[in-house]
Image: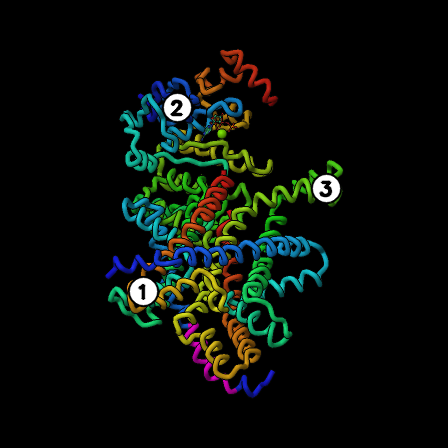
Amino acid sequence: MAHSGISVLFEGTNFARLMGGLWTSVWIALVSLAIGLLLGTLFGLLRTLRSRLIRFVLLLYLEFFRIVPTVVLLFLVYYILPRQFNINMPATWMAVLAFSLWVAAEFSDIVRGALESVPKHQRESGQALGLNQWQLFRYVLLPQAIQLELPATINLATRVIKTTSLLLMISVMDVINVGQQIIEANNQTHPTGIFWVYGLIFILYFIVDYPLSLWAKHLTAKQKD
Amino acid sequence: MAEEILKVEHLNKFYGDWQALHDINFDLQKGEVVTLLGPSGSGKSTLIRTLNGLEPFKDGNIYFKGEKVEPTPKEWQKLRQQIGMVFQSYDLFPNLTVLDNILLAPTKVQKRDREEVKKEAMALLERVDLADQANSYPRQLSGGQKQRIAIVRALAMHPELMLFDEVTASLDPEMVRGVLEIIKELADRDHMTMIIVTHEMNFAAQIADRVLFLEDGKLLEDTPGKQFFEHPQTARAAEFLSSMEF
Amino acid sequence: MDWTIIQQSLPNFVQGFKLTLWLSLVGIVGSIIVGIITSLVQYFRVPVLKQILNVYVEVARNTPLLIQLFFLYYAFPVMGIKMTAETCGIIGLIFLGGAYMAEGFTGGFNGVSQNQLDAGEALGMNQFQLARYVVLPQGLSLSVPALAANIIFLIKETSIFSVIAIPELTNTALDLIGMYYRSNEYLFVLVVAYAIILIPVILLLDWLERRVRYGAFGN
Ligand SMILES: Nc1ncnc2c1ncn2[C@@H]1O[C@H](COP(=O)(O)OP(=O)(O)OP(=O)(O)O)[C@@H](O)[C@H]1O
Ligand SMILES: [Mg+2]
């Protein structure tokens, strides 16, 4: 019966365990975003420099991430690090590594786009005031670029959060993995529990992501006028 | 006896709480050319757009050919088929060729025969020296050429009244003359009824049967052309004329 | 890297490759159709339907495909609705993709400038004619960058189908790794296979983007 299924969510420590799983997902998303945004800013800056070699290498890096699905990235890290390089670390950190590199790639493109879209006359009027390269970057380009890139960055964050749903594929104890365990444990007594557990996880993701999406949309609308 | 094309009575227009047009009254007879002059921000664009229903107005009446205009979207949509308008920014449709830009409204809105309209369009293009560009896209044309096409596009609808809002303001100086000549010819040869907003004072003096002088949303003068340029009635108009240095 | 292992696995990968291509194609076409209809309903503010589709877009965009698939594949049968894994995959992908496409098209429609709308209105067009001759052609050109990004995104999302055991590319690789414990070789083939699909698609879309940008902004 459907009404008995919902009790699965609240039996024993089930709800607390699900929340714990959600925290793992959010934590991985946050740490990956922090590392990825820093690295991405650096890459983005490097891509506006003149050196052909640097630009080419970074372009290859970016294109690699454009082509390879995130699931596959996770498996690359998961299998190749321990087997090829004998590096053993918890799956959680492998996920952080894969996600950070992915975020860095995407963010470098956002940063470059924003820096290049600051109008040329802004750059020139800064120069005309006698600002040097660094001052120009710090006081003219960066503030404008941050404003331009904020909505895209928030959208990237919502995607990272959604992508944490893939963590169970490399056996991280994320919210979905916990959910599956609960479903299996209660399969005999509450066959409809599956509906409620996945339903709750569905709603949890929505609750985390939707406010961010709204914020990004709001900022984009504000930029238009 | 001249036929009245347009009559505006006690027109008031607000943007939010702020009043952009104050109690505007004037009329326009068939074949008349009126220039609408005034300093920047005085409300010229607002007025001319209101006459075409692009801006809603709060109160007052507009009569078109003796009939009171019901300011509903449907009514305006019908009237606009008889009122041509050309904008400062040309606004040709970038995805269509020159010819398709001209044919679109006559064939789709007025449902006229395509072949017949096409013949007419080619004749009009001939008249503005652009027949060879019929199959070009707007991006391939200069500003002056685009503006001449925009005029043709409006004329192809057989309008009874043409509205021009600073149609030469974004053109390079050497392009201005060609466009103004077309408008002049419309007046002299076709006796087209027109309201023209312009900052080209020499042109205005040459073409205007009457001048409407607008400041801060108020119609300060409605004077025959020659008289306005030689003896403006208000001090504000005299000041405006001297500031234009022509 | 052992090339004979790679060679032996190729028939499996070719099967997976075909399936990935097929699922992507169906998913993309379906998403575009759902997206256009949704964005038109939103553009014309069709009452009731508009509110429903707004909710759809927000729900689909703000939840992961993986959970959407789990629901369709594992939870629905409990309620008596059974579908094959492939059907679930396609429905899930179109559910997600339709919402992304709708966002893209809506962005394009809203990007058509007020000047263009004024020009159309001044020529006496009614709302329908304005949409048909001004908003749609120009809005669709403007939404090509978003369309391109979504197409690439959806192709990559098919990799998530592996969780409901659809034997597409990623699932094929995972199966082989599970059976023969040779991750380097199989992952290498997997990455190459995605490159073979995506590089031409990316190049084609870049070309399309350049073309329409020229067409749409050349005024
Ligand atoms: N959509 C709008 N919302 C609010 N205020 C507006 C709007 N459009 C115009 N205005 C204001 O109305 C006034 C008149 O503007 P309008 O564009 O009609 O002037 P104008 O005489 O055409 O000036 P210009 O010679 O610079 O074209 C200005 O103060 C302007 O700021
Ligand atoms: Mg104006």
Where does label 2 land, which residue?
A: B13
Query: What's under tag 3, amino acid-wise?
Result: Gln
Q: Are marks 3 and 2 on the same chain?
A: no
In the rendered image, residue B32, in percent from the top left (x then y), is placed at 40, 25
Q: Is residue B182 left or right of residue C92?
A: right
- In this picture, is B96 found above or below B50? below
**Which residue in the protein does label 1 denote?**
C75
Q: Nearer the viewer, mark 2 or mark 1?
A: 1
Badge 3 is on which residue? A135
* Front label number (3 vs 2): 3
Which quarter of the image is occupied by the C terminus of chain B? top right
What predominant SS class does the magenta segment belong to? helix
Tell me the magenta residue range.
Answer: C8-21
Examine the rendered structure and indicate whether residue C69 appears above or below residue B86: below
User: Label 3 marks which chain's residue?
Assistant: A
Q: Give coordinates of residue B72: x percent, y percent.
A: 29, 32
